[in-house]
Image: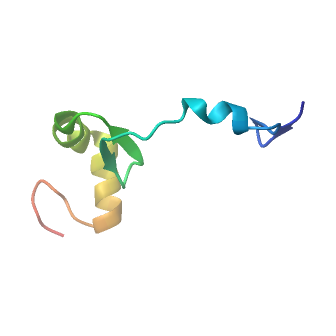
Amino acid sequence: MFFFMGLYAGQGDDRVEFIRPVVGYFCNLCQLIYADEDEAKLQHCRSQTHYRKYQEKTGKDPWTNTT
């Protein structure tokens, strides 16, 4: 048994049974996924982390709509 970049590098085919597709709301700025639309749009988009990343990406203040 050995590790590569912190991951077990043995055979992995027998471990994929736990991977399933999911449906949700993904924030491209923060790289986070939410199962609930309200949590994503109403809570996350008002978070300080998202706000800062929004400003960095767009150069805009989302609360005043000015540059």
> Of all residues shown, which one is farthest toward the right?
1
Q: Is residue 24 left or right of residue 65?
A: right
Quadrant of the snapshot with the C terminus: bottom left
| Residue at (19, 43) in percent of width and height | 41
**Total labels drawn:** 0
Please provide percent x and percent y for residue 59.
28, 67
| Left-right relation of 7 to 26 | right
Q: Position of residue 23 (x, y in %)?
A: 32, 41
Spot occupied by residue 34 in the image (x, y as percentages of width and height): 31, 37
User: Which residue is more in the foreground, 54 or 33?
Assistant: 33
Would you identify the image quadrant in which residue 16 lies?
Answer: top right
Quadrant in which the N terminus appears: top right
Rendered residue at 16%/35% (across/down): 38
The quadrant in which residue 28 appears is bottom left
* In the image, farthest residue toward the bottom: 67
In the foreground, 12 or 60: 12
In the picture as drawn, the residue positioned furthest to the left comes out as 64
Dividing the picture into quadrants, the one containing residue 11 is top right
Residue nearest the viewer, comparing 6 with 10: 10
At a point 47% along the width and 36% down the height, the residue shown is: 20
The chosen color scheme is rainbow
- Front-lying residue, 13 or 26: 13
Where does residue 61 sit, x and y in percent of width and height? Answer: 19, 59
Q: Is residue 63 above or below residue 60?
A: above
